[in-house]
Amino acid sequence: MYAGKVHMGSDGRAGAGQASGGVCVPPADGSASALVQHADMDQLCRHNPPYGFRALCKERSAVAMLRGLSNPRVCRYKTCAVVGSGGSLLGARLGASIDAADAVIRVNLAPDAREAARARSAPHRDLATWVSDVGSRTTWRVLAMEGYGYLNHYGRFWLKPPLGHGKHDNMSGIPQEPLLAIVCHEPTAGTGRCRAERLRQTFAHRWAASYLVNPLLLREWSRRLFAGVRHQRVPSTGMNAVAFASQLCGSVHLYGFGNGSCPAACYHYYDCGEARPGGGVAQSYMFGGDPGATGGYHNFSAQAAVLRRLAESGAVHAHWGTCGHSSGDPPDPALLNRRGGGSRGAAALRTHRRRGSSRTKGQIDNV
């Protein structure tokens, strides 16, 4: 079921996958690395945010800190499911396919099956249906710092005063799964969540389960795939997840991303549906021509065109889901006997570790 590779090479083409070193080494072709510790530091310090750390680089010790950040234990996966939060997942019964991947990468704080079934805004509370639609596993999350700053992994909420508002002397004991890939749009030397002091507290310790995405990788993808696109300041977190997966994974499969063909579908699967008539936002609003829909930050119509091109070229494998505005019929029991469902899926859900205390405060822009 899973085949193919994706990697954005220095020639601007998505094709040859990253070698076995994955995200733990700089790409051999000279393109930007996935993680900041392997970045070209001269380039990183030359560019301003959101595609560089120029302000932060004024502090020499901060550059040394970035270079010394650790790698994840697993550098590369053969197959990955990158799961957005589009309403096209409702009723599509793609959960078994999602959970069959070696790694499941979710975007921002979009819920897995167990979390969706407990969400107040969810269109229904049936756990088996959520497992069959969105899957139960999460290996990685890709988040913007705006959302990450509300999780326990963030030093401000974990450490005791005066370093934070938490109860702990150090960062030992923070959740170790899923792993988190974090995008810093506004790194600075002195203030903000991406300031050097906070990055050091949060990422530069031996218990870290969070990793900084190289902004040069996002710059590379933006310049090559979104050149000339209006009404977009930065790519969405979902697009950043695809870029990150291009180096983490040999084969990238997309789920829950909009391709522009389902205007009536929910924008987010977890806050609208047949149980909530009129609830949530339709994709037609977010994919329309009004830049105010995203505050001018993202152009989802352009993103849909990019994803279609990547899928048509074979660079990624897109599972577009359904266009219906419902959660479908009850799931086929056979689906729940596959990986991610049934007793195995239930066990995975029981042992799934909670992350942080808030699911509503972060930016969730991942269709």
Image (cartoon, rainbow, N blue to C red):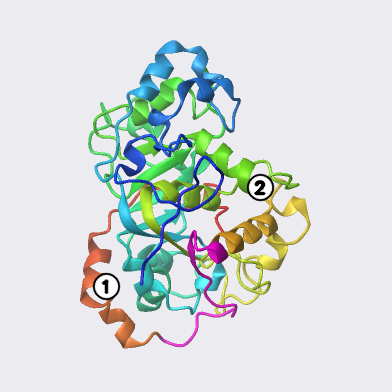
x and y, in percent, of residue 261 in the image: 66, 72
Q: Are marks 1 and 2 in contact (CB under 8 Å)?
A: no
**Which sits in the foreground, 49 or 46?**
46
Q: Is residue 325 magenta?
A: yes
Inspect this view and state whether residue 85 appears. Answer: yes
Quadrant of the rendered structure where residue 312 is? bottom right
Image position of 57 (left or right of 261): left
What residue type is disc 2 on? Answer: Phe
Check disc 1 and report the residue beneath it. Answer: 339
Q: Is residue 324 above or below residue 357?
A: below
Give the extent of the magenta segment: 311-330
Quadrant of the rendered structure where residue 165 is? top left
**Which sits in the foreground, 312 or 193?**
312
Residue 226, disc = 2
**Which sits in the foreground, 181 or 173?**
181
Q: Earlier in the sequence, mark 1 or mark 2?
A: 2
In this view, the mark in front (1 or 2) = 2
At 62% from the left and 44% from the top, the residue drawn is 224
Q: Is residue 45 above or below residue 86?
A: above
